[in-house]
Image (cartoon, coloured by chain):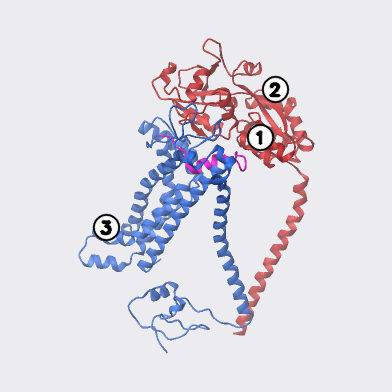
Amino acid sequence: MTTISPRPPTRQADQARLVGLAAPLGSSLPLAGQRRVEASDRKNHGRMDRPRLAGRRSSLNALVELAIRVLAFTSIAAIVLIFVFIGKEAWPLLHDSVIGREVTLTKMWFAQLWPGYEGPEHVWQPVSEVPKYAAWPLVIGTLKVTLIAMLVAVPLGVGSALFVSQYAGRRLREIIKPTVELLAGVPSVVLGFFALMVMASWMQQVLGLDSRLNALVAGVALSFAIIPVVFTVSEEAFGAVPRSYVEASTALGAARWQTIVRVVIPAAGPGVAAGIALGLGRAVGETMIVLMASGNAAILSASPADSVRTVSATIAAELAEVVFGGAHYTVLFFLGVLLFGFTLATNLLGEFAIGRMRRRLGGTA
Amino acid sequence: MQKRQVQGRGNQTRSRSILKTATQGLAMATALLAPLAAVAGDITVKGSDTMVILGQRWAEEYMRAHPSTTIQVTGGGSGTGISALINGTTDVCQASRPMSAAEKEKLRDRYATVGVEIPVARDGLSVYVNASNPLTEITMDQLKLIFTGKVTNWKELGGPDAKIVVYSRENSSGTYVFFKEHVLKNADYTVRAQSMPGTAAVVNAVAKEKFGIGYGGAAYAKGIKLLKVKQDAGGPAIPPDEAHVKDGSYPLSRPLFFYLRNKPTGDVGAFVDWVLSPVGQAIVTKVGYYPLK
């Protein structure tokens, strides 16, 4: 009977450990009713072999497995179906001739010379004698607010995660961690309301801005929604850095801050990047905060003190009114596809990076 | 070993029977309550954000007098309400602007009727400025120049040297469309006009913004100043009050409508009749709009 002997860590061994085999290393007792798993069980990828039991227990097992499998595939099916649906509604923009008379991709993405204007401009005014559907003001507005939010949220989120995982004592950690995660529970409409009523006036007083509702106010309010996301994932990343790395660095004579800057942060790099990617995805898709606090003026400018109109707020405000199947409706769905695609891409990137981090660090996760 | 198996099965049977009883109970409750939901009159009212407080006050008073009827009132803008009427998701649509020809055609395509238009109140669309603003009157032309972005500083109107902050409504709003047609003469709003989700939001924004200007229904005006409007530079400045709205001398007076797909009958008919009765019209005055007569 072969036993599991200590050997240099292999991928399979790590994963077997992650799965949490009950049999301690070196023991030779098999678990009741189950075949012994060896670390050399390549074809199992470290998973326990499915027990072959006879009779009613086995069919119940199969039924439960089927039910769970259906649930898992339902989530995937939901995402695929959502994408298909909004894609279907946005598709006429590309080929329909009736809609093509009112709006085309060219008209959306290039400055047009409209009657009554002095020069070619990007204008978003879909309810008008001549409907105008310029997408750049909306996209730039979204990016402006997201950038401001990330500039505030990333230092705060990563910094707090670093403090909580590396510097804070147990007591302090137990206070800070739940409090920051509590911020995640605040509904976005409440954050938007707070920004509209309190923050906007205060910012106008302190900074002397022309316009009370602008990208800066919306960005800062949005950062409150992102900080918990960045914090949670970064904190997990920092926590997953093995003690051995820190101990080795200290043994070699590094100061605390040197260890943190040169060992811990690079090791946790993919995890922190994942947190930032997830925060980015959330920021781009966030609707209520920007709807209430950004002023919703489709201005194309680089200044954060100007009001902005984001893609998400545009869809939220206008979709209820449009006539089904018309040009306005199709353009809104097209913007929805853009938004969906972007957030899907950033979330996938984040998930991928988290997976890489877990594998790389062997996971205390 | 055997004992453990028996216990295991017993736990399964117990949980399965609890599940069964729960499902049966739920089914019975639904079956008993369903007829109740069908019997009570249920009226959906959707549409104009200008009219939503009026609709809600009407609904409250009507439900107090007729407890068997429930009325749901939501806003979203006149455009939203008209779309809902066309899509069949509402009984009554509140609108602060008339239905356009294109919308009437869509309604005819779906329901073989051009709908029924019932004026229920009058509104004087007011121009709001901050209470600290020295301006007291404005001409229609100046309004157009401000809201199309041709005039950007208060000093061009004789006010302080400061940029004008323009507040407008979302494009689903009937007020937005009415203002565009009657004041801007179908020109575009300036891109710098900030879109607020409702009239109350416009009032709130102008109240907090020293150099702001906005527009909306007369009933919401609290904490801000209403400007008198002159048809042209030489004419009299008319304030948006009851007398001037009723006789039509205020340039921005407009009727507020109910739209229905067919002539109102049954529960909906009783509600509409009540709204047009002296009791309903008294509520119009209380809310801050102007009755039909």
* Residue that carries the numbered disc 2 in the rendered image: B292
Q: Any idea which chain is the red one in this picture?
A: B
Looking at the rendered structure, the kind of residue marked 1 is Glu
Q: Is residue B200 left or right of residue A36?
A: right
Circle number at residue A261: 3
Residue A220 showing in the rendered view: no
Q: Determine which of the numbered discs, if any, sits on residue B103 in the image.
A: 1
> Which chain is home to disc 3?
A
User: Residue B246, percent across and down?
Assistant: 66, 18
Badge 2 density bin: few <14, some 14–19, many ≥20, Cα 10 Å: some
**Magenta segment range?**
A306-328
At 51% across and 82% down in the image, what residue appears?
A: A34
- Quadrant containing the C terminus of chain A is bottom left
Classify the position of the N terminus of chain A by image quarter.
Answer: bottom left
Instruction: Provide the secondary structure element on which disc 3 rests.
Output: helix
**Residue B12 seen by the camera:** yes
